[in-house]
Image (cartoon, rainbow, N blue to C red):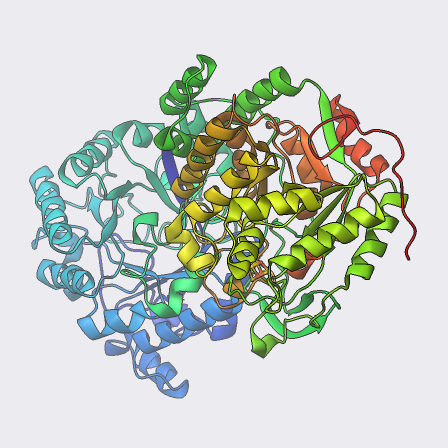
């Protein structure tokens, strides 16, 4: 589906004083009409906070041009408040907005010089200035020295030199000719060709307003507006987005048909102070127009995805952008507020660590958060041509490659429900109505680890936050006691995972297996990641296949797929630089399968990677499955950000959005179809309400009952202590499915196990 974006924003008219007088403008006021020359910091923050509460991503700071040069009141206000220039004050409030609300400032401060642009680049991820028109003789601009075309082109050029993601545009119908519009668009295209910095061009229609010099001038006709949009689309390179404001026309449909791909800022709480008589349309109305045209509507950030990287963003604003980004660098689209997270202290919880968050709480859904996700499934489905083509291929039995998987992973709007429905149909064919689970216990035998996984809140945290839990190492007797207890509570499996203790060699894992089997001979030992077995073999100097055989003989039955994270070395270099590589993970699982040990595929998604990495992960693991058939299931594990060191160091996103979670499970079902039959939802990280939606998006398994789960809780998840059959049933039965207990390898559990007493 063609994507149409908008920026959920608040409008902050920092000062309505302006040294210019444009014939069409109602924004600029004289000091006599204003209670104060500038909004105070508190007034600004009140508006920004209200915007953040309402789910906005942008604080649009709009102001007149250098009012201190014209009005003594402006000069006096700046002097009294300790600012030399208006731009100094803009920079100050932008930083406060970033710090206290997390909204991304987009500064529209008019024609600036190079130093001013550079000053604002530190606090505003993007900036904007309308060129309006390069015609120097417009009556509309007669009282406006800053509308001098050369001055505005110079601003555009300096923004390019400074690598500022820049928004500019033309004003249509202020007396300029069609040739003027072409010339202006060509000049923008030329500047962009040199620097690549023009992220969008606004094509804005003139609307006459009372109390302006041009109050009797004719409004720009829809024909002229549509023609100007078509010109912009034709003259500007495809990578430059074309925007038209939806509130300046009666019907936004012709704008879509003319070729725009963005509606600009839309505010749920503030008026358009430049066009106060034209309220923004309701988002639901806009969405229905967009979807009726076979397109999808998505929120974006002030910077477009192409610019959300180190080249274009000052270090000071990078995390603020990341913190509001989804995997495609568009705005997170879960409803609710996103506030900057702050931690003042941390408390150990014995076997892990827990951060204590202070300040205003976000209300949007995050993986691990104790709130319900939005309902995306089931919902009325619709598809664009690309998704329809991919799903038609799936129906014909085609295997999806990376490109097609990315097409599905980047779906938005009603396509998400369509992909979930396709996945659900495949699930029905493969698994029927049964929803399986295994009765198990997690035993995390140590939290001491020599590895440096940057996401891992279980084994360590930044020293400054004292996140590391008390170091512990369970003895084999303690492990055996926990196994006996698990068995007495009905567990058929123990899942053994832990840190890589510096004292371990491969004998440790063999001894653990022996201790478990000695305690409960029939229990299934699901344990030891690819990292643990690879490290165990390496420390013994033994070939991995032989070591795995010895583990199997000692009682190991299957391997968890954890340590896979993202099977792409460019991402592993960020998340787990010293852990097994992609090929080492695959080799370890291949070797395990060859000695008769089954395993599963996990993916930890939502931190720093993009959809292409998810697609590669599926394709790489699927290739191995074709050779060995040893994987039992696919288990998506959403990144839980709250206590994760990489998030606390401001280098990762806040985990996946709910749309991404739904798609990961649904696309997993579709991508592994014919290869891996079981798709599991991790209720530990998603909560049971989330899991219920996923059961309608390709999922057939709810994983384990998990008495004791420390790893997700150490990363800040609210769920994770254990779940009862009844709680599972409450998820499964209302949607007409049947809860079925399984063994680790998807067989029917046998009768009671032998339990040997402790010696
Ligand atoms: S993820 Fe595992 S290997 Fe990495 S630091 Fe944490 S415990 Fe160690």
Q: Quadrant of ligand 1?
A: bottom right
Q: Quadrant of the C terminus?
A: bottom right
Q: Within the image, what quadrant is residue 599 found in?
A: top right
> Which residue is at the front of the view, 643 or 365?
643
Res. 683 image quadrant: top right
**Going by the image, does 1 lie left or right of 663?**
left
Is 376 or 387 nearer to us in this picture? 387
- Viewport quadrant of the N terminus: top left
In the picture as drawn, the residue positioned furthest to the top comes out as 396
Count the labels in the image. Answer: 0
Is residue 380 visible from the viewing direction of this image? Answer: no
Q: Can you tell which quarter of the image residue 64 is in?
A: bottom left
- Residue 466 visible? The answer is yes
Q: Compared with residue 447, is residue 237 higher up or lower down, i.e. above or below?
A: above
Vertical placement of 469 versus 628: above or below?
Answer: below
Measuring 66% from the left and 47% from the top, which residue is drawn there?
527
Question: Residue 429: percent from the left, percent from the top?
Answer: 61, 15
Report the residue at 39% width, 63% height from top. 318
Q: Position of residue 521 (x, y in %)?
A: 82, 42
Q: Is residue 598 left or right of residue 480?
A: left
Nearest to the observer: residue 631 or residue 439: 631
Q: Position of residue 172 (x, y in %)?
A: 20, 42
Q: Residue 224 vs residue 322: left or right? A: left
Where is residue 438? Give x, y as percent: 75, 36
């Amino acid at each position: 589906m063609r994507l149409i974006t908008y920026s959920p924003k608040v409008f902050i008219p920092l000062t309505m004083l302006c040294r210019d007088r444009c014939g069409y403008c109602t924004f600029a006021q004289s000091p006599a009409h204003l209670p104060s020359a500038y909004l105070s910091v508190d007034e600004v923050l009140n508006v920004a906070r209200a915007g953040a509460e309402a789910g906005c991503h942008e604080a649009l700071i709009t102001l007149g041009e250098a009012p201190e040069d014209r009005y003594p009141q402006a000069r006096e206000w700046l002097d009294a408040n300790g600012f030399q220039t208006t731009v100094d004050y803009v920079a100050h409030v932008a930083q406060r907005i970033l710090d206290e609300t997390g909204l991304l400032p987009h500064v529209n401060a008019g024609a600036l010089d190079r130093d001013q642009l550079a000053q604002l680049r530190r606090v505003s991820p993007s900036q904007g200035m309308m060129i309006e028109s390069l015609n120097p003789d417009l009556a509309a601009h007669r009282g406006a020295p800053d509308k001098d075309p050369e001055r505005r082109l110079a601003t555009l050029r300096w923004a390019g030199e400074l690598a500022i993601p820049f928004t500019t545009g033309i004003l249509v119908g202020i007396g300029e000719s069609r040739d003027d519009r072409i010339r202006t668009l060509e000049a923008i295209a030329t500047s962009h060709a040199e620097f690549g910095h023009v992220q969008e061009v606004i094509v804005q229609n003139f609307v006459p307003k009372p109390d302006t010099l041009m109050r009797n001038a004719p409004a720009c006709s829809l024909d002229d507006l549509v023609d100007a949009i078509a010109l912009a689309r034709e003259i500007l390179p495809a990578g430059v987005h074309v925007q038209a404001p939806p509130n300046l026309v009666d019907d936004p449909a012709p704008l879509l048909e003319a070729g725009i791909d963005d509606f600009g800022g839309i505010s749920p709480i503030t008026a358009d102070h430049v066009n106060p008589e034209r309220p923004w349309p309701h988002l639901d109305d806009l969405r229905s127009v967009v979807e009726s045209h076979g397109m999808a509507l998505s929120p974006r950030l002030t910077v477009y995805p192409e610019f959300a990287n180190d080249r274009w963003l000052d270090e000071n604003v990078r995390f603020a952008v990341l913190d509001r980004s989804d995997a495609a660098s568009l705005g997170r689209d879960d409803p609710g507020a996103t506030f900057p997270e702050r931690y003042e202290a941390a408390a150990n919880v014995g076997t892990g660590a827990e951060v204590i968050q202070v300040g205003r709480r976000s209300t949007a859904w995050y993986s691990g958060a104790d709130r319900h996700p939005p309902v995306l499934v089931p919902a009325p489905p619709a598809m664009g041509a690309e998704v329809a083509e991919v799903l038609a291929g799936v129906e014909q039995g085609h295997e999806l490659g990376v490109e097609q998987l990315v097409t599905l992973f980047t779906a938005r709007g009603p396509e998400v429900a369509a992909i979930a429905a396709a996945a659900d149909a495949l699930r029905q064919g493969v698994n029927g109505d049964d929803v399986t689970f295994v009765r198990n216990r997690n035993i995390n035998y140590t939290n001491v680890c020599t590895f440096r996984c940057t996401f891992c809140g279980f084994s360590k945290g930044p020293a400054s936050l004292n996140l590391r839990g008390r170091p512990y190492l369970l003895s084999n007797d303690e492990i055996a006691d926990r196994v006996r207890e698990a068995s007495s509570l009905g567990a058929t499996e123990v899942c053994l995972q832990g840190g890589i203790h510096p004292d371990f060699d491969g004998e440790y894992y063999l001894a653990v297996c022996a201790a478990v089997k000695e305690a409960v001979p029939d229990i299934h030992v699901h344990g030891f990641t690819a990292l643990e077995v690879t490290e165990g073999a390496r420390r013994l100097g033994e070939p991995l296949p032989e070591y795995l055989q010895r583990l199997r003989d000692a009682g190991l039955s299957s391997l968890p797929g954890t340590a896979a994270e993202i099977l792409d070395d460019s991402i592993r270099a960020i998340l787990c630089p010293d852990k097994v590589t992609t090929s080492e993970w695959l080799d370890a699982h291949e070797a395990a399968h060859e000695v008769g040990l089954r395993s599963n595929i996990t993916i930890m998604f939502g931190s720093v990677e993009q959809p292409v990495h998810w697609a590669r992960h599926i394709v790489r693991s699927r290739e191995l499955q074709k050779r060995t058939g040893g994987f039992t299931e696919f288990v998506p594990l959403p990144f839980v950000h709250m206590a994760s060191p990489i998030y606390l160091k401001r280098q990762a996103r806040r985990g996946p959005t709910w749309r991404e979670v739904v798609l990961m499970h649904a696309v997993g079902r579709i991508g592994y179809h014919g290869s891996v039959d079981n798709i599991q939802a991790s209720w530990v990280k998603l909560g049971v309400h989330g899991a219920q939606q996923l059961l309608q998006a390709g999922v057939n398994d709810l994983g384990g009952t998990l008495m004791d789960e420390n790893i997700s809780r150490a990363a800040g998840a609210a769920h994770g202590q254990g779940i009862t059959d009844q709680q599972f049933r409450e998820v499964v039965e209302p949607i007409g499915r049947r809860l079925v207990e399984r063994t680790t390898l998807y067989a029917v559990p046998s009768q009671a196990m032998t339990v040997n007493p402790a010696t």
